[in-house]
Amino acid sequence: MDRAGNVAVLLVGDSPQAFSLCQQRLESKGCHCHRARSHHDPKAMLTRKQFDIVLAMHPIERSAKNGLAVLLSGSRITLFYALPVEEGCWWVPVLRIGDECIGEPALRPHEFSIVLDVIVKELKVGPTIGKSNSRL
C-alpha cells in the first residue's frame, strides 16, 4: 500500500487500452495505478516503489514470465497475467501474496473482477493480517 493507504497496482502492457476497464474499476475502489510499457520496465519500477498487485499481459517469451514471477515470489505481491482470447482475456493467477498459485484455473473477466474486489478489500482491511485461506 502506498503512503496514502491506497492499494498500489502496476499494470504491465504495451497497449494503454489493454487495462482501461480494469484500471477504471481499480481507481474507483481507491487504488493507485501505475503503468509499465514492457516486461523489462517493471523490474526497474519494482525497485523504486512497493506494489501490492501486478497485472500483466501474458508475455510471448516464457523467460520473461518466469523472470517476473521469480522476482516477485516471496514478496507480498499478487500477480496475474492476462491471457488474450478471441473476445477479451482470461486472467491467470501466478502469485497470491507472494505464494505461487500456478495450476489454479484461469478466470473469466467477470470472475476476475470479483476476485480482484476481494483482494483489494483484504489489502485495505489490513495487509499484515494472515494470508487468506480462500482459493482464487
Image (spheres, grey):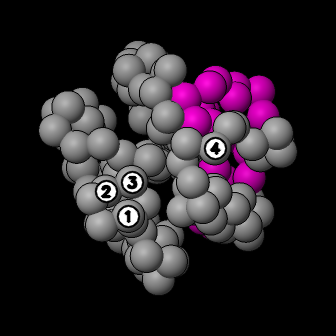
- Residue at which label 2 appears: 2
The quarter holding residue 88 reads bottom right
Mark closer to the observer (2, 4): 4
Q: For marks 4 and 1, give the CA distance.
A: 15 Å
Q: As displayed, is residue 32 above or below residue 45?
A: below
Q: For marks 4 and 3, give the CA distance.
A: 14 Å
Range shown magenta: 86-107
Task: Name the residue located 64 percent from the left edge and 57 percent from the top edge.
Answer: 122
The answer to whether any part of residue 11 appears in the image is: no
x, y percentage for residue 129? 63, 44
Q: Which amino acid type is shown beneath numbered disc 3?
A: Met
x, y percentage for residue 18? 41, 64
- Residue at which label 1 appears: 5
Task: Name the residue located 76 percent from the left edge and 63 percent from the top edge.
Answer: 111
Q: Is residue 93 magenta?
A: yes
Tell me which numbered mark, 4 or 3, is placed earlier along the sequence: 3
Q: Are marks 1 and 3 in contact (CB under 8 Å)?
A: yes
Q: Are marks 3 and 2 in contact (CB under 8 Å)?
A: yes
Task: Name the residue located 31 percent from the left edge and 56 percent from the top edge.
Answer: 2
Q: Is residue 90 left or right of residue 80?
A: right
Q: Residues within 10 Å of mark 1 (few under 14, many from 20)?
A: few
Disc 2 element: loop
The answer to whether any part of residue 29 appears in the image is: yes
Q: Is residue 101 left or right of residue 57?
A: right
Tell me which numbered mark, 4 or 1, is placed earlier along the sequence: 1
Disc 1 element: loop
Q: For marks 2 and 1, give the CA distance.
A: 5 Å
Q: Residues within 10 Å of mark 4 (few under 14, many from 20)?
A: few
Task: Name the residue located 46 percent from the left edge and 27 percent from the top edge.
Answer: 75
The quarter holding residue 80 reads top right
Tell me which numbered mark, 2 or 4, is placed earlier along the sequence: 2
